[in-house]
């Protein structure tokens, strides 16, 4: 079982057992109180005396998970990938145990998960790392409780950021905010650092243009993926030894898929997926009929034997969008964009939360170094170059997941897909066709999926030689075996 890695010493870190050094800077403002904003606020408390979180939605009811309007994918299944869980545990020690105590199970990824590929079931073998399944609102609730308890953090709910303020040198920052009820006037909030964590709804490109900056290049890839999901209370049979079941969509022959996950005591979240223009219905009969077209019987079983908790929720908010701030000739030194505000990935591949967690850890590392410089050489100007450095390195963290996500989504439009994408699609098809029959190859795949190894782990000379040495599959086994109704 993989445990969270110990934090590496960084410049300015205090000695073990000693009190951390006091914050260097006065105030930071975080735009967005969702997942990425909560991670950013947690990081900033170690470096700023005051952290203000601006959140447009009203405050959630105490002790209750809240589904925010800015997170359409919150109704759909989520999993903490192993790499992301390591970073979250570093930022919020004991988080895994706290979520487990609230009924979110922790199990070896492959040993407790049923995965059906077009050529068969994946091996049910221990892979040496765990995965924790949790509903997005429940995760945000725990993180929000942790961050709210920090004495230097203030939440301002029901307030919307309207504009970004830069001084003549483009380095000082502030925001203009406005209560959503419209009863109060605009207010200017000044800060030493502003973090945009408003996600897919970010208006930062427009704000930068209004401040005299060029618009960033924005890359958009749409696989036309649709999710439809529902919660069920479902009590498994005594002999059931899995807590998640999955059938991926795979271009070009398998446009339908699904995922079922236990996210609490007898609480399951079932998500049906359609790619390449397929769309699971949001009505009762259509949802059930769509599940019946899938080869994986677990989805229909949960529908037939479970009790629905709420309506079917559908979203098409799955477009991949990357604002290339790292390519701009000038970036304000005291401005940070993080998470989906930079690069929003198709949530079906479950990598966005891990990318945001890695970027939050990066921000902590860079601020620690800048704080060390400020303490030894004086605080003046030490944040003025933070922004450009962060955006370049944050882009590097997003690059691999972006390539994997967009290659998979572009494969649904082969006529317009670049040659590299078509070749990658062929190679991925060759790999996935053999996963059910070759545990060593499956282990490489699992580690890459959970971002414990880079995406090239499946394309190393050793991996290529391993794949080439495997026997060819019969032609009928190398294509989708889904029923005709699912194609």
Image (cartoon, rainbow, N blue to C red):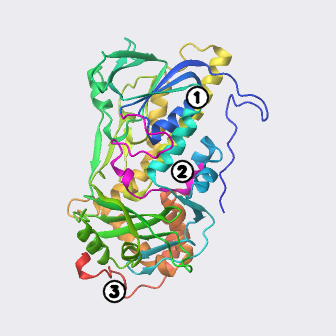
Residue on which disc 3 sits: 475
Which residue is identified by label 2?
84
In three-dimensional space, the C-alpha distance between marks 1 and 3, rounded to whole angstroms, equals 58 Å
Q: Is residue 132 above or below residue 377?
A: below
**SS for tag 1?**
loop
Q: Provide the residue span drawn in magenta.
A: 57-86
Q: Residues within 10 Å of mark 2 (few under 14, many from 20)?
A: many
- Residue 482: x %, y % from top left: 31, 80
In this view, the residue in front, 285 or 390, is 285
Say which residue label 1 marks: 45
- Front-most of residues 139 and 306: 306
In percent of width and height, residue 487 lies at 24, 75
Name the magenta segment's main secondary structure.
Answer: loop
Q: Residue at x 36, y 32 (%)?
A: 56
What residue lies at 68% left-to-right and 17% top-to-bottom? 376
Residue at the (70%, 24%) spot, across then down: 21
């Amino acid at each position: 079982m993989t445990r969270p890695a110990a934090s590496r010493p960084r410049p300015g870190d205090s000695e073990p057992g000693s009190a951390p050094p006091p914050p260097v800077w006065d105030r930071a403002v975080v735009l967005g109180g969702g997942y990425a904003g909560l991670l950013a606020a947690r990081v900033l408390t170690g470096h700023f005396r005051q952290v203000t979180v601006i959140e447009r939605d009203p405050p959630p009811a105490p002790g209750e998970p809240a589904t925010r309007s800015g997170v359409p994918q919150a109704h759909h299944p989520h999993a903490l990938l192993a790499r992301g869980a390591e970073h979250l545990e570093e930022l919020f020690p004991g988080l895994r145990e706290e979520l487990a105590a609230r009924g979110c199970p922790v199990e070896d990824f492959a040993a407790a998960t049923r995965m059906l590929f077009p050529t068969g079931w994946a091996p049910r073998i221990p892979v040496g790392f765990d995965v924790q399944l949790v509903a997005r609102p429940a995760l945000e609730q725990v993180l929000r409780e942790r961050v709210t308890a920090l004495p230097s953090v203030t939440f301002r709910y029901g307030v919307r950021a309207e504009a970004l303020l830069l001084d003549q040198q483009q380095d000082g920052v502030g925001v203009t905010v406005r209560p959503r009820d419209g009863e109060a006037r605009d207010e200017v909030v000044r800060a030493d650092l502003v973090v945009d964590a408003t996600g897919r709804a970010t208006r930062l490109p427009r704000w930068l243009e209004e401040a005299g900056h060029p618009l960033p290049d924005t890359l958009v890839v749409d696989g036309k993926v649709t999710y439809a999901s529902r919660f069920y209370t479902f009590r498994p049979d005594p002999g059931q030894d899995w807590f998640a079941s999955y059938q991926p969509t795979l271009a070009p022959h398998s446009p339908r898929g699904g995922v079922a996950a236990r996210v609490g005591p007898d609480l399951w979240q079932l998500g049906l997926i359609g790619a390449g223009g397929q769309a699971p219905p949001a009505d009762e009969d259509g949802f059930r009929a769509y599940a019946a077209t899938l080869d994986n019987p677990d989805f229909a079983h949960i529908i037939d034997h479970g009790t629905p908790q709420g309506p079917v929720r559908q979203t098409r908010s799955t477009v991949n969008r990357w604002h290339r701030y790292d390519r701009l000739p000038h970036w304000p030194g005291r401005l940070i964009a993080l998470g989906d505000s930079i690069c929003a990935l198709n949530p079906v591949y479950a990598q966005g939360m891990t990318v945001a967690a890695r970027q939050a850890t990066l921000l902590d590392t860079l601020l620690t170094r800048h704080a060390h410089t400020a303490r030894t050489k004086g605080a003046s100007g030490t944040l003025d170059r933070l922004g450009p450095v962060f955006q370049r390195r944050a882009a590097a963290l997003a690059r691999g997941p972006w390539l994997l996500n967009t290659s998979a989504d572009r494969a649904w439009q082969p006529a317009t897909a670049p040659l590299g994408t078509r070749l990658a699609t062929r190679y991925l098809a060759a790999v996935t066709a053999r996963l059910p029959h070759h545990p060593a190859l499956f282990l490489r795949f699992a580690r890459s999926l959970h971002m414990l190894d880079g995406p090239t782990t499946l394309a190393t000379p050793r991996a290529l030689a391993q794949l080439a040495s495997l026997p060819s599959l019969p032609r009928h086994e190398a294509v989708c075996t889904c029923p005709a109704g699912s194609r």
